[in-house]
Amino acid sequence: MTPFTKKVIELIKNIPEGKVMTYGQIARLAGSARGARQVVRVLHSSSKKYNLPWHRVINSKGEIGFQDDEGFNVQRLSLESEGIEFISEKKLDLKRYRYNPEN
């Protein structure tokens, strides 16, 4: 496992309930500012193995990235069950819910 992958997994594991991080934010904190797509690949390949709270990772617009209904609905319901409110069908308020481990 690469150091980047280890750091991505660590960051995702530590997102608290009721908070989210973006793919790009995680990539930057893991050492690759342009590695958002790598974060997607780590989530896809490692979420079950490492029991990652994958639903807490969203895109830079504050939106759920899933295009299929099933994935979208699972993620939205998971976030809502943690107290996150949506401002539109797909979008939440990043200023309110973004987790910043640097603070």
Image (cartoon, grey):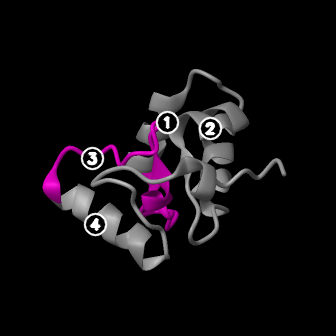
**Nearest to N terminus: mark 2 or mark 3:** 2
**Nearest to N terminus: mark 3 or mark 4:** 3
**Residue contact between numbered discs 4 and 2, judged by CB atoms under 8 Å:** no
Q: Which residue is mark 1?
A: 60
Secondary structure type for disc 3: loop
**Nearest to N terminus: mark 1 or mark 4:** 1
Q: Which residue is mark 3?
A: 66
Residue 85 location, x and y as percent? 44, 66
Q: Is residue 1 visible?
A: no
For this view, does 38 lie left or right of residue 44?
A: right
Front disc: 2 or 1: 1
For this view, does 33 lie left or right of residue 79?
A: right
Q: Which residue is mark 2?
A: 25
Front disc: 1 or 4: 1
Q: Main secondary structure of the magenta part?
A: loop
Give whichever of 91, 26 is nearer the camera. 91
Secondary structure type for disc 4: helix
Q: Which residues are magenta?
A: 45-69
Give whichever of 49, 31 is nearer the camera. 31
The image's mark for residue 74 is: 4
Q: What amino acid is labelled 1 in the image?
A: Ser
**Residue contact between numbered discs 3 and 4, judged by CB atoms under 8 Å:** no
**Nearest to N terminus: mark 2 or mark 1:** 2
- Residue lying farthest to the front in this orientation: 87
**Residue contact between numbered discs 2 and 1, judged by CB atoms under 8 Å:** yes
Give whichever of 7, 76 is nearer the camera. 76
**Which quarter of the image is occupied by the N terminus?**
top right
Q: Residues within 10 Å of mark 3 (few under 14, many from 20)?
A: some
Q: What amino acid is labelled 4 in the image?
A: Val
